[in-house]
Image (cartoon, rainbow, N blue to C red):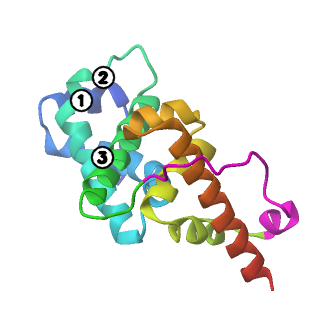
């Protein structure tokens, strides 16, 4: 039995018709690629799986908004990024973690880059998942996604200085965790 070649245009057309087989093919093709993003923003594997499912539900619900002249994976990535942010927002309504009022950040890098380079991706993921929800969200948006502080503040409806302070705290927390792990 030979596997049919993945034809994005055919699959997208099928998804527009709510064809479950095409939706499954799209899921099978893209889920492994976006699961890493889900894990970076999630506290646990279970949360990442929830973001993954929510993200695909958003894709199937909004696939008619995809303009075919742009790269499809770029659109998918943006959908999952927004799903992760919305997942955080929904969780933060029930938590009492707040942005700090005073700026306490400093620009800089991890103190010992040798430690970071010696870690494997799974170790780094575990450390990032150990951050608070807010710190993890800000850290990922800044470091991994490349958003500016003002863009993050806008995404999270927060003050830019507070976002800087959260990023500083996340970085310090990771530095301390790295030092502890390497002892």
Q: Is residue 103 toward the left or the right of residue 90 in the image?
A: right
Disc 1, disc 3: CB below 8 Å? no
**Percent x, y of residue 107:** 75, 45
Q: Is residue 9 toward the left or the right of residue 141 in the image?
A: left
Q: From the image, tell me which residue sits under label 2.
A: 66
Q: For residue 73, which quarter of the picture?
A: top left
Q: Work out how far the residue at label 3 is from the one at label 2, CA to CA, in angstroms.
A: 20 Å
Q: Work out how far the residue at label 1 is from the one at label 3, CA to CA, in angstroms.
A: 18 Å
Query: Magenta includes 114?
Result: yes
Mark carried by residue 86: 3
**Dot in front, 3 or 2:** 3
Q: Main secondary structure of the magenta part?
A: loop
In depth, the one of 121 and 12 nearer the eye is 121
- Quadrant location, the N terminus: bottom left
Query: Magenta includes 23?
Result: no
Decide if residue 110 is in sight here. yes
Mark carried by residue 63: 1
Decide if residue 5 is in sight here. no
Q: Work out how far the residue at label 1 is from the one at label 2, CA to CA, in angstroms.
A: 6 Å
Disc 1, disc 2: CB below 8 Å? yes
Which residue is drawn at the image coordinates 17% and 36% (left, top)?
Answer: 61
Which residue is drawn at the image coordinates 25% and 22% (left, top)?
Answer: 65
Q: Mark 2 Cα within 10 Å, few/some/many (few <14, many 20+)?
A: some
- Quadrant location, the C terminus: bottom right
**Bounds of the magenta segment:** 99-118
31 versus 79 height, above or below: below
Hey, which residue is sitting farthest front in the picture?
102
Q: Mark 3 Cα within 10 Å, few/some/many (few <14, many 20+)?
A: some
Q: Earlier in the sequence, mark 1 or mark 3?
A: 1
């Amino acid at each position: 039995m030979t596997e049919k070649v993945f034809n994005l245009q055919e699959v997208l057309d099928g998804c527009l018709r709510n064809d479950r087989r095409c939706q499954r093919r799209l899921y099978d093709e893209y889920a492994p690629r976006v699961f890493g993003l889900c894990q970076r923003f999630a506290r646990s594997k279970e949360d990442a799986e929830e973001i993954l499912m929510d993200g695909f539900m958003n894709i199937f619900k909004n696939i008619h908004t995809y303009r075919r002249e742009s790269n499809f994976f770029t659109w998918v990535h943006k959908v999952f990024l927004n799903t992760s942010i919305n997942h955080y927002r929904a969780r933060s309504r029930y938590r009492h973690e707040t942005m700090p009022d005073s700026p306490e950040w400093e620009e800089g890098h991890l103190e010992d880059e040798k430690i970071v380079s010696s870690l494997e991706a799974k170790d780094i993921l575990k450390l990032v998942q150990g951050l608070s929800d807010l710190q993890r969200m800000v850290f990922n948006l800044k470091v991994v996604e490349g958003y500016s502080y003002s863009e993050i503040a806008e995404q999270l409806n927060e003050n830019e200085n507070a976002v800087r302070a959260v990023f500083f705290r996340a970085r310090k927390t990771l530095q301390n965790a790295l030092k502890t792990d390497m002892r």
